[in-house]
Amino acid sequence: MPDLALTVNQRPLVLDVPHEASLLHILRNDLGLNGPKYGCGLGSCGACTVHVDGVAARACVIPAHGVAGRSITTLEGLGSRENWHPVQAAFEECQAAQCGYCLNGMVMQTAALLQREAHPDEARIRSELSGNLCRCGTHVEIMAAVMLAAK
Ligand code: FES
């Protein structure tokens, strides 16, 4: 298997990765990072969202070898229970989770947005999160959390 050098959550790594493996596959299966979720596998639901060099991206449709030399951040690298990222703290404060499956994508997409724009308005937030699906229908609480983080 060919080598792949990349950085994950600020850790430089060299991994043996098959040509056909997706970024999501190596994050979850090889590195045990289960923050990014497998939802649709088609780039359509947002559950697998990670940051690639600070930009939100769908890990399920990115070939692992396509991110050689890049810096990947997963939910695990964003914050921790002892030190939440402000977006994670806002989601907790607003009790935005129902089943929680979409939250990785909601949080990572929001964190990337706020990195670029500290105080987006509601229309901007809705547009940014329009590709992140929540099947429980807890969008009201999620919007409240994002609006809190964007204050
Ligand atoms: Fe990647 Fe749905 S699992 S976008």
Image (cartoon, rainbow, N blue to C red):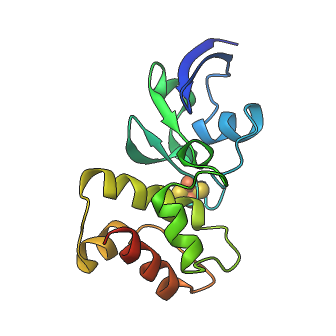
Q: Residue at x 68, y 33 (%)?
A: 26
Dividing the image into 4 quarters, which one contains the C terminus? bottom left
Residue 104 vs residue 1, the one in the foreground: 104
Q: Residue 99, position in %: x, y? A: 71, 76
Q: Residue at x 24, y 66 (%)?
A: 119
Q: Residue 109, position in %: x, y? A: 43, 58
Ligand 1, image quadrant it occupies: bottom right
Q: Is residue 42 visible?
A: no
Dividing the image into 4 quarters, which one contains the N terminus? top right
Residue 84 vs residue 48, the one in the foreground: 84
Q: Residue at x 63, y 76 (%)?
A: 97
Q: Residue at x 57, y 44 (%)?
A: 74
Q: Which of the 4 quarters of the picture holds residue 128?
A: bottom left
The vertical placement of 149 against 64, above or below, is: below
Instruction: From the viewer's perspective, tell me whether residue 48 is left or right of residue 29.
Output: left
Instruction: From the viewer's perspective, tell me whether residue 27 is left or right of residue 43.
Output: right
Q: Residue 116, position in %: x, y? A: 26, 51
Q: Residue 75, position in %: x, y? A: 58, 49
The vertical placement of 8 against 116, above or below, is: above
